[in-house]
Image (tube, rainbow, N blue to C red):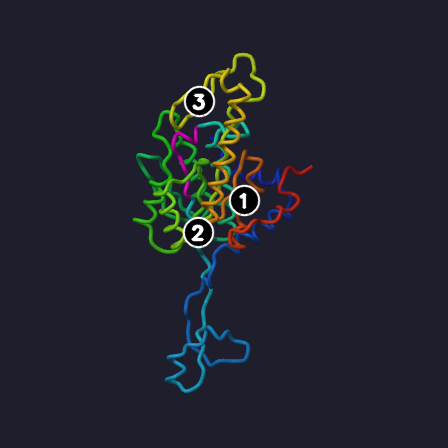
Amino acid sequence: MPSLLRRVKSKMFIFAHRRTLTLLDGEYGSVFKGRSLDFDELRAYVLGDEVRDIDWKATARHGSPLVKRYVAVRRHSVLLLVDTGRNMAAQALSGETKKDIAVHAAGVLGYLACRHGDDVGLLHGNAAVSRYVPPRGGEEHLERLLREVDSSVDLAGPPSSIAQQLDYVLRYLKGRLLIVAVADEFLPDTHTENLMRRLRARHEVLWLSVRDADLAPERGRHGQADSMDVGTGAGIPLPLAMDSAVRAAYTESMTERARKRKDIFRRLGIAEEQAAGSEDVLTAVFTLLEKHRSGALPARSAPKGGTRAG
């Protein structure tokens, strides 16, 4: 069976220049906030030391300023939190299945983590079950994770419910993580928003949403079937989906929904970006990392080379 990670890496080098990959490495390296340091020892204060590093209790006992020395934590734990409910078997805006875009996004982010020597784990599932694979290092392990995502999305399976996976993290996973969620384009309800808020308080959280397909193409093709909502199973007859008034109302509704989603993520302080297809993933990942580094504020444009190389 062809390697999914090899496919991801091939696409990365097709759609990106070397400079873009270097910038992606830099943005990834800035993700973990705080000092990411472990205490080593005390030593005498010297000019230029950070005032915040002074150990005031030890200073009082010693009679002269002492500062804490730290050593860097070299290895972090990254958790890929991936929606593998049946909603991800639906078509994305690009025409690809959402699952394929999710595998590519997880592969890009996992590969960046591997390049930095970090451990990568996976939590995925649907409304009925959550499955957890603990973080480990290496590309062989990442390949296993990508295969698990790829094989777990089933059109006949339970629907998506990312709240189930968020609750699992909060209940069972300890220690600070970098959590990268890759999920269906959904509008969080009050319960899910509360879970996201609690998750954000404990961990570094980034969120990549896979965009929904349009209601129907502008012009129907011969033999085209009716549209269907994979999550609910509800169908929309093609003539109704092609009606201009229905399309206008749908567009207005989706615009308002997108505004509400954006407000929720901004309120929670979680950087969120969207990908319509696999060709968008690199640019979306760069923008997502940059948003997170800058505090989930609107990011600058992605660098040249984030799209297909000419």
Q: Amino acid at mark 3?
A: Met
Say which quarter of the image contains residue 221: top right
Residue named by callout 1: 285
Taking the image as shown, residue 201 lies to the left or right of residue 98, namely left
The residue under the point 44% across, 50% down is: 268
**Residue 88 highlighted magenta (yes or no):** yes
- Segment colored magenta: 81-89
Q: Answer few, some or many: residues within 10 Å of disc 2's Cα (few below 14, many 20 plus, some between 14 and 19).
A: some
Amino acid tagged 2: Leu
Q: Secondary structure at mark 3?
A: strand
Query: How far from the left and from the top, in percent, is residue 162?
Result: 38, 39
Q: Secondary structure at mark 1?
A: helix
What numbered label is drawn on residue 228?
3
Mark 1 or 2, nearer chain start? 2
262 lies left or right of 163: right
- Residue drawn at point x = 43 percent, y = 44 percent: 80
Check contact, mark 1 vs mark 2: CB within 8 A: no
Query: Label 3 crowding class (10 Å Cα cut-off): few <14, some 14-19, many 20+?
Result: some
What residue is shown with label 2?
178
Per the model, the C-alpha gap separating discs 3 and 2 is 35 Å
